[in-house]
Amino acid sequence: MTDDGARTLQIEEPGRVPWDAVILGWGPVLPFPLAAIWLWFGGPDVLRPAMHLWGAAIALFLSGVRRGLSFRMPGGWTWSQLAMFAWLFWAGFLALILPVGPAFALLSAIYASLAVLDPIAADRAEAPLWFRRLRPAQMGIAALGLAGLWWLS
């Protein structure tokens, strides 16, 4: 620690996706395409509101993840991190209070934006390096599942 109470952190990030990120990353998003497929084949209607709440809850959680990442930036947060946090939080909140159909459309856009913007954030050192590999497929599958749920609503 320095005299002014500051400290220097040195980290090394893996380029490969850690095993826990595979489990904790894919586990929460796989219900979206699975629910869409199940509904396509006549699954119970309770899947719609359940996936609505689940999708909004994850979007709100991910807003906190993005805000938390910004706390450890050398030199402080960046505007793009704050913008992503705000987008995820307010869009997730709006999705929570919208009716199911419009909520699925918004949630699909939220997750599609993560598929595109998280790899960019990783390249800019605003998110873990392995987001570059995980997020396009993970969030792309979630977005497709949510689009399917929107279509089936």
Image: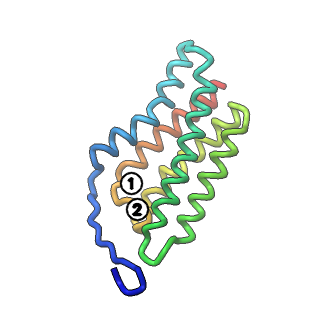
In the displayed structure image, the side of residue 25 where residue 64 appears, left or right: right
Quick one: quadrant of the C terminus? Answer: top right
Helix, strand or loop for disc 2 = helix
Three-letter code, disc 2: Ala
Label 2, label 1: how many angstroms apart (C-alpha)? 6 Å
**Pointer 2 with pointer 1, Cβ within 8 A:** yes
Q: Nearer the viewer, residue 2 or 137?
A: 2
Three-letter code, disc 1: Phe
Quick one: quadrant of the N terminus? Answer: bottom left
Res 122 label: 2
Q: Is residue 134 above or below residue 38?
A: below
Q: In percent of the image, x 53 and y 53: which residue is there?
A: 64
Residue 128 image position (x, y, % from top left): 37, 59
Res 93 label: none
Helix, strand or loop for disc 1 = helix
Which colour scheme appears in the figure? rainbow
